[in-house]
Image (cartoon, grey):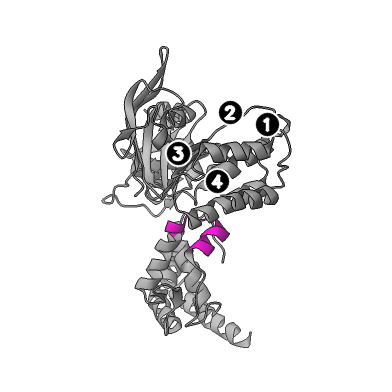
Amino acid sequence: MVKPIKITHVSKTFGKQQVLDDINLTIEPETIYGLLGRNGAGKSTLFNIITNRLPLTRGEVTIGGQSVTNNDAVLNRIYLMSEANLYPSRMRVEDIFKLTKQLYQGMDEKLTQSLTQQFGLNSHARFNKLSTGSRSIMKLIIALAVDVDYVILDEPTLGLDANHRRMFYDALLDSYAKRPRSFVISTHLIEEVSQLIERVWVLQDHRIMIDETTEEMLNKGYAITGPINDVSTYTAGLNVIGHEELGHLVVHYVYGDLDNDRPIPDTISISHIDLQRLFIYLTNQEVAKVEN
Amino acid sequence: MQFDFNSTEPLYLQVAEQIEEAIFTNSFEEGTQVPSTTEISKQFHINPATVLKGMNILVTHHFLEKRRGLGMFVAAGAYARIREKRQSEFYDDYVVNLVKEAQKLSLSKTAILEMIKRGFENGQTN
């Protein structure tokens, strides 16, 4: 039985700078998560802590009650694909595949071969001769083929063109269908993953701002459009996270429950908004400050 | 099948509607198997849990039936049930909005009834 990864009260400081502040999350088995955050929010640091590549300042990360700290047996069940290049730079792609196979419990050779072919990756090429996109492809192939229970993908589509990104999402869902396991994906291409991810985490100001299913989160986002006076009256006291104006016509973006007792004037219209816009307004601090 | 990822309607409801539409237009015939959760998930890049949630709505309505170990099939009588459901929703889905818009535009009841008549006449000649 695969156990969840529990991240409990995790904080991280680099010198005087707080990078993560009291993070509490659970990675359940067989679930696809999206970790969203602005640049510098601490996403990569969090991933490095989960995989014991960085020591944490406070808190703990455990699997089935066992800490991941220097625990090779449990760390072997997690694969982190990141921007960091941990391979000897002159090593050939095929040798990197072999090395990975030895480091982990194993690697699906058939899948490795078919993906290498599909993506047109030259397996004889040396790692340092690969373009950014090809490096991403090589790492993605490893991430999907390696035998682990949790796959963490930090900016997996870096440098990939639209066709290759599509191929990657195909391969990801195919692999997930054949062997359901946990995926945590961080990306700035929110639109592209919004329908893939079951649960959303938003990391903002070094803390977890949102930990909800994608559906719940989308359900709480509203755009309220109409004449300025009617909209302002209707949204007074609600959690307005952003607004746009066009003369007397305004849109107020609200995150959270609307007031069901409040009458809706027929001059205003209420609709939901997509994940990307929701994310932008939630994490746009300047707007938030003006609102406060 | 076509999904509008920019639509504000929850994706699982879109999945349910698209399959329902495919049954209603006979793309998926009664008694035949519908694509699996995995197939739909892969083809449209939708989380399998979302697809399953949509399909389960159709199972509740008896448009689809699960056959153990085989997959999902279009239930016998699904077409008639979908038609019945849509007929019962017709007033809320269409008439209410029609009247609302007509009132905004100051169109009288007589004018609207006249237009509906004309619509039916044009529909017959087409």
For the image shown, how many numbered marks are present on the structure? Answer: 4
Is most of the magenta stretch helix, strand or loop?
Answer: helix
Which image quadrant for residue B100? bottom left
Disc sitting over residue A91 in the figure: 1
Disc 3 vs disc 1: which is toward the camera?
Answer: 1
* Residue A93 seen by the camera: yes
Q: Amino acid at mark 3?
A: Ile
Do callouts 1 and 2 point to residues on the same chain? yes
> Disc 2 sits on a residue from what chain?
A
> Disc 4 sits on a residue from what chain?
A
- Cα separation between marks 2 and 4: 18 Å
Residue B67 vertical position relative to residue A56 in the rendered view, above or below: below
Disc sitting over residue A78 in the figure: 3
Please tell me whether mark 4 sits on a helix, a strand or a loop.
Answer: loop
- Mark 3 surroundings: few (<14), some (14-19) or many (≥20) residues within 10 A: many
Please tell me whether mark 1 sits on a helix, a strand or a loop.
Answer: loop
